[in-house]
Image: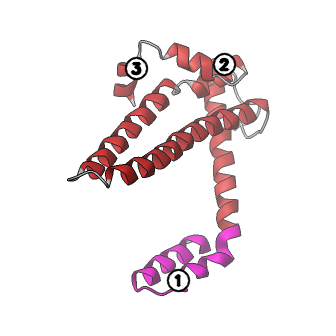
């Protein structure tokens, strides 16, 4: 088992016993964790891009595998980064709005603040799912059009939300 995982499991076990130094044991393996994340993310993008090129363009790999990093992979990384940034933006906006609203609602009688928090969380989850479904064609559109396909994905999924939601 990789040292990163061993250290994390040990830190979780010690944290359960309320050892204040448990998480500090992770510090020496943080660089390995970052390297692991970067490598697996890069390989995932390369494999996904190669498969999408084969399906969308009919472009077969030059060698046995499609292990290359080029413009398509960079565009795909950027497109997925944009999706991630959109979701993080929604979450941060919700968090700030929820803090403000709960602060004001705490003055209201009863459990209105709790109710507002639950409804707000449900609303943000629904919004995030809606946006992710609408952007679900971003990867094939990015590969097919050779540009980041946010707008074309949004247009293609118009009037097809419910079947796509059922697919995912």
Which mark is drawn over residue 22? 1
Q: Quadrant of residue 160?
A: top left
User: Magenta span: helix, strand or loop, mainly?
Assistant: helix
165 in relation to 102, above or below:
above
Residue on which the image places disc 2: 144
Labels 2, 3: front one: 3
Rendering coords of residue 32 (x, y %): 68, 68
Question: In the rendering, at what x and y percent does residue 62 appear?
Answer: 77, 30
Helix, strand or loop at disc 2? helix
Disc 3: which residue: 161
Pick whichever, 18 or 145, lies toward us.
18
Count of numbered badges drawn on the protein: 3
Spatial CA span between label 2 and label 1: 48 Å
Chain part drawn in magenta:
2-31
**Dot 3: what SS?**
helix
| Label 1, residues with CA under 10 Å away: few <14, some 14-19, many ≥20 | some
Q: Is residue 30 magenta?
A: yes
Depth check: give the residue in front, 133 or 57. 133
Q: Earlier in the sequence, mark 2 or mark 1?
A: 1
Instruction: Give the vertical position of 78 relative to 157 (above or below).
Output: below
The local crowd at label 3, few if under 14, some if 14 to 19, many if 20 or more residues have their Cα within 10 Å, is some
């Amino acid at each position: 088992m990789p040292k990163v995982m061993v250290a994390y499991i040990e830190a979780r076990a010690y944290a359960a016993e309320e050892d204040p130094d448990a998480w500090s044991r992770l510090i020496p393996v943080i660089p390995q964790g970052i390297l692991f994340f970067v490598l697996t993310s890069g390989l995932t993008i390369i494999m996904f891009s190669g498969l999408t090129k084969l399906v969308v363009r009919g472009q077969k790999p030059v060698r046995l595998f499609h292990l290359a990093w080029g413009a398509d992979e960079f565009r795909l990384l950027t497109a997925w980064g944009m999706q991630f940034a959109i979701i993080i933006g929604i979450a941060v906006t919700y968090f700030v709005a929820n803090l403000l609203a709960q602060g004001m609602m705490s003055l209201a009688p009863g459990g209105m603040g709790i109710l507002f928090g639950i409804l707000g969380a449900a609303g943000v989850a629904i919004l995030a799912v809606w946006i992710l479904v609408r952007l679900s064609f971003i990867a094939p559109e990015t590969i097919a059009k050779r540009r980041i396909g946010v707008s074309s994905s949004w247009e293609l999924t118009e009037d097809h939300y419910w079947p796509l939601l059922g697919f995912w």
